[in-house]
Structures are given as C-alpha cells and as structure tokens.
Image (cartoon, grey):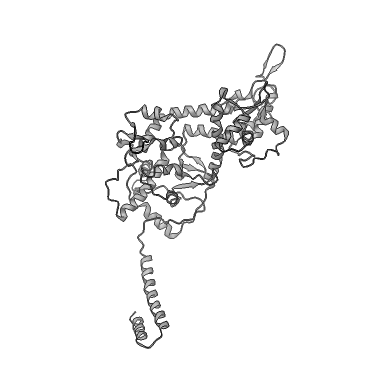
Amino acid sequence: MSIFFSHTVNLLKTKTTTKSLKSTTTIAFSFFYYNNLTSTRNKSQSTSIPKKQQRVRDHGYDNYMEVEKKTRKVLKFRPLILSQRNQTIQVARLDILSRRIGFKQHEAGKFLLKYPHVFEIYEHPVQRILYCRLTRKALLQIEQEKAALDAQIPQAVTRLRKLLMMSNTGRLRLEHIRIARSEFGLPEDFEYSVVLKNPQFFRLFDADETRNKYIELVERDPKLAVCALERAREKEYRERGIDAEDIRFSFIVNFPPGFKIGKYYRIAVWKWQRLPYWSPYEDVSGYDLRSLEAQKRMEKRAVAVIHEMLSLTVEKKITMERIAHFRLAMNLPKKLKDFVLQHQGIFYVSTRGNHGKLHTVFLREAYRKGELIEPNQLYWARRKLAELVLMSPRKAKMDRELVSYRRDGDEVDEMGRVRKVCPENRFNNFEVEGGVGGDGDGDGDGEGEGAGDLNSNLGSDVESDISDEDDDCDEIDEEEEDACVSE
C-alpha cells in the first residue's frame, strides 16, 4: 500500500497532464472500493429474503383454478334459475338476463349445452319453447352444500372470532367480511345467524364518521390466540424432542418444482427462519416499531398473519383482492402481491381463472398434488359441483340411452306397456346402483356394456372435451345436439 501511495504522490509532484492525473486518482479510488466490497460481502449479516426472485408455476394449483373458473360461471347462472317460478326459465329470457353477468348475446344457450349434468334443457309440451332447469344431481349438490354449511356454523363462529382478534382494534367492516363469507364458511345471512345470535361474542354497530357497519369483538379469549402453525410446531417438537429446537420461529417451506435455490438465498432463508416475531394475535400497538429489528419482526409477522388467515378458510385459499380489504386493520404491507411472491415456499399465487385479473393465494403446506390434505364436509360438497362440471357431455347421452334398456326394475302396467323409470332417481350421493344399465340377463348386477363406463366416469376429474373458450357450436352434429336437449 505504501509503495502504491508513494508512486501516486510522485506522479502528482511531476509535471503531468490533467489526463494522467484523473486516471491515477480513478485507479486509487477503485482500489479502495474493491477492498471494502470484498470485506463486507464475506461478512453479510442480512436476514431479509431477496425481493427479486424467479417466478415458478405449479401446475397442480393452476389446474385447480382452471376447474374453478368453470364452476364460477355455473354459480352465476344458478341463482337466475332458482329465483324463477317453479325453478324453470325460458332459454331466451335467460339469454337476456345473462348479459348482466358478463355474457354476450346467444352465449347463454351455448354455455348451457356444455354442462348437461348441471343444466337440463327441455321443450315445453304445449308452448313448444325451450326451457332450462337444474338437473336432479345439481339440486342434490345444493342440498348437500347447504346441510354442510349449517352443520359447521359453530366452527364458523370460532373462525370469525379469531379473525377479529387479529385486527388492531378488534373490529372489522361488515362489508369486507360479507365479500369473503364464502371463503370463511359463513352463510349468506351470517349477520343474523352468526353475529346477532351470539351477542356474547360479537357486537354490531354503525360508525359515526364513516357510516359503515362494523363487527366488534366483545372480549378476547386467550385460548383462541393460538395459531395453526404453533400447533404444528408443538406436534413436531413432541415427536422430535430437542432436535426440533431450531423450529421455534420457522415456517413450513416447500418450494415448487423447478425453483432454483442458490447459495446466498439458502443462507438468507436459514437466517430468516430463526428470526423471532410477534404472534398475529398479539397487540403491537404499544411497541416502538422504528428500529430496524422491529421492522424485520413486523415483516415476518405479516407473513404469519396471511398464513393464519389462509388457515381459517375452508379451502385454504383466498384471493389477493380480499386479503387487501384487511390490509389496514392487520398491518399488512402496501405492495401485497410483491410481498407474497417473496415467499414462494410458503404461498403460491395463481393467476388462472379470470384472464390474469384474479390472483388466488394458496397455502402450500395444506395441499398435495392439487388436492386438500385435510378436507372437510363443506369442501367435499363444493367439489361435487366440480365433478358435475367435469363430466363429459357424451356421458349425458349415454344416461339417456340406458333408459331404453329393459330391466327387472321397470314397472309394467295392465296394458303390457313399459313405463320407463327416470335413471336420475337411481342416483344417491352420485353413486350408481346396480340396476342401471344391466347386462340384459335380468340379474341386476349392472355388468352390462354401458354400466362400467358410467360408474368409472361419475367421480372422475377428466375435463370436458368442450372448453369455455370454444363457443363454436356448429361443429356439434345433430345426434349430440339432440342428446343435450331432453325431450
């Protein structure tokens, strides 16, 4: 170093040009900058995860959202039909009403033909006009979902109490909870069936300054202030003992396939996992949050809040837009999407389902190969609708063809004519009894030519051959079109 400085001073004393002077000083400053950079890089103490990461898609979650995109459109048509008299509506009138929910002219009829297991189109015997109604299997799915929703109201009360405990003031807007009621398993009339029926837990009032209704928690319960992640840590600690000491503040991380984990990123995640943080149910209003250590703890606490919110949902998923409604009440960051994408091992953000306009956040540890690990009755009831949507339209044609086969279960009147029994009466919880589609020997074992295919496809997840984007019905021949329209 001394030789380097002496050489620089000698050059300054001599009659050098301005160009050589500038080049010499530049070399000196670059030398010092290189030494400082190499010394600090080897001794990095950062505990934050890099913000810019490679976005990796997980097809299991994206395929889940592709199915939900179809069921979401079906759910838009369902109240239009059920609100009519006798729960039937003319197809022409339904085409007019469907424009309110985003469909164009003549698109409603094409959409109904894609899902014959959900919608039944028939011709009126007198008016000779096409009418539409829900099938028996679709009505059975609605009853099952309603029964599952009513049975889990006590769990919904607990979920709402824990959601209010995570807010800063113990209160949330009624409109924000109403928008996310389906995710948290709340009925449509939760304002009366959940809030007003439990005055010992909730209080409903109008704010004077904003004129909005709020739900306030009457009293905090310390027994409910336990996160789902803490219970998972306790279970792991009981199994592993002292070896699980390092998981005290860690999260369950499961990176998607193809995610490249570098050396420095692995070190940053290791340090971040051991960083202590405050519980989502802990009141942090009286803490001094100006220090750098407090800000890091609050960032990790925000991850824990989103994790606990997803754990309170029925399907362990919720849209990013509905999380943003609780951002101010739960101290979540402003750039919520970028913040969630920093933790791809904990959450997964899917943009499928609404042409990239909808962002759905999944809890990765709750899913395996696109299916919920610990399902509940409400989840299964909703998946029944997805099964009906995914059934191929060709199977509906097979169901009607099976009616023409003579079975021992047919009722014969005095004139010797066979009165055909509707095959949909044989369905009980989407299972086929042995009498449907017999093999013709009269034993009722259902081993015939059409029964095996029918039983194998009722519970399958095979997608329909006709997609949502395929609106061209000219390619459907006359036989398939007659099969989709019941007489």
Left or right: 332 as drawn, with respect to 113? left
439 vs 384, nearest the viewer: 384
* Residue positioned most to the bottom: 15
As drawn, 180 above or below 133: below
Q: How many marks?
A: 0
Residue 232 coordinates in the image, percent (x, y): 38, 42
**Taking the image as drawn, is residue 459 in sight?**
no
| Of residues 66 and 237, the one drawn nearer to the viewer in this rendering | 66
* Residue 393 sits in quarter: top right
- Viewer-side residue, 479 vs 329: 329
* Residue 411 spot, x, y in % from top left: 66, 16
Position of 245 compared to 398: left or right?
left
Q: Quadrant of the C terminus?
A: top right
The residue positioned 59% from the left and 36% from the top of the image is 390
Q: Can you see residue 303?
A: yes
| Residue 429 at x, y percent in the picture | 55, 27
Taking the spot 38% from the left edge, 65% from the top edge, the residue there is: 41
Q: Residue 382 vs residue 275: left or right?
A: right
Q: Is residue 419 left or right of residue 268?
A: right
Height in image: 381 above or below 168?
Answer: above
